[in-house]
Structures are given as structure tokens and as C-alpha cells.
Image: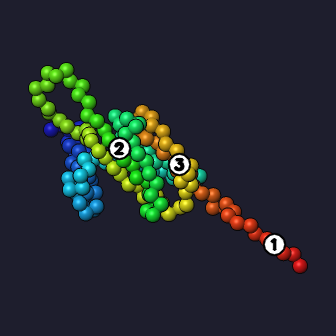
Amino acid sequence: MARREVDEWFWQVGSELHRISEELASGRPKVASGRAWEPRIDLIEEETRFLLKAEIAGVKGDEIQLLYLPEQHSLLLRGYRDEEDYSDGMRTGIHQLEIFYGEFQKEVRLPNIPIDPANIKAQYRNGFLLVTIPKLDQFTVTGTITFKSN
């Protein structure tokens, strides 16, 4: 086996072990929870906002739901990826299947930093859902302060 093939094999095994460990950590396998797959997520903190990037290629915009869950201080991403048949009907076998289809759901807990849920914005570009989550200004005045001078 060539070095590159060995590296790719280890990468695939590592990815699958990571997926399995995530399922076990959640306390229930995906088969039992009724979900077929979860998109890969990046959550990046910037000075004034968080940027969430979800890899959901092939999901139509009207099949995506994004909800803020204030009790958990998290975002819930739900959707559905339909399987499209790109073959010409002459398929005689399948040799590899790695792309998941069907319903998906992923909850992303946010760091313990106040955010502005009313101004969360999302856009779908090149197979990625990009969500900007503005932080609340730590110095926002929420009431009136009166100073007395002697």
C-alpha cells in the first residue's frame, strides 16, 4: 500500500472514530435518535460577533431552519437534503457512499457571552450557511443613572 493510501485510510478511520465517539458522548446513537446526519460546523469568535459556518452543500434554502434557543444559549440548525439521482438510470452498482441525505439537526452551544438574537443574520453561499451572531455591547446602558453633586 502506498504512503498516500495509508494516510487516507488513517484519515477515514479517524473521522469515523470521531463520529462514533460524538454519538457515544451524546448518550444515544444516531439510529436511535432518528437523525441521519449532522453538518460540520465552525464557530469563530471575532471582536464584535460570532461567525457560525455550516457545511450543508445541496440543501435548498427553503429546507433550512435556524432557531435561537435562549434557555440553552444555543443555535439549532435543522434541515433536509434531498437525494438527487444524477445517473442516467443505467446504474449497475454502488462502490462508495459517503454523502448523507435526509433530515439533519445540530445544536451549537454559544460561549457564555451575551448576544443580540434580534440581529442574527444568515446567508447561504457556495454550500455553506454563514450565520453572523452579534455580541451585545458590554457597556450598553439599560437604565438612567442620575449623579448628584454636593
State which tag comes first along the sequence, 3 or 1.
Answer: 3
Residue drawn where x is 47% and y is 60% of the image: 70
In which quadrant is the N terminus drawn?
A: top left
Label 2 CA crowd tier, 10 Å (few <14, some 14–19, many 20+): many
* Residue 25 marker: none
Viewer-nearest residue: 56 or 14: 56
Look at the image and tell me whether residue 17 can be seen: no
- Outermost residue on the front side: it is 62
- The amino acid type found where label 2 is placed reads Gly
Is residue 72 in view? yes
Residue 26, image quadrant = bottom left
Name the residue carrying label 2: 79
Q: Secondary structure at mark 2?
A: strand
Q: Which residue is mark 3?
A: 120
Q: Are marks 1 and 2 in contact (CB under 8 Å)?
A: no
Figure check: 139 above or below 78? below
Q: Which residue is more in the foreground, 92 or 79?
A: 79
Mark 1 or 2, nearer chain start: 2
User: Is disc 3 in contact with disc 1, using a CB cutoff of under 8 Å?
Assistant: no
Q: Which residue is mark 1?
A: 147
Residue type indicated by callout 1: Phe
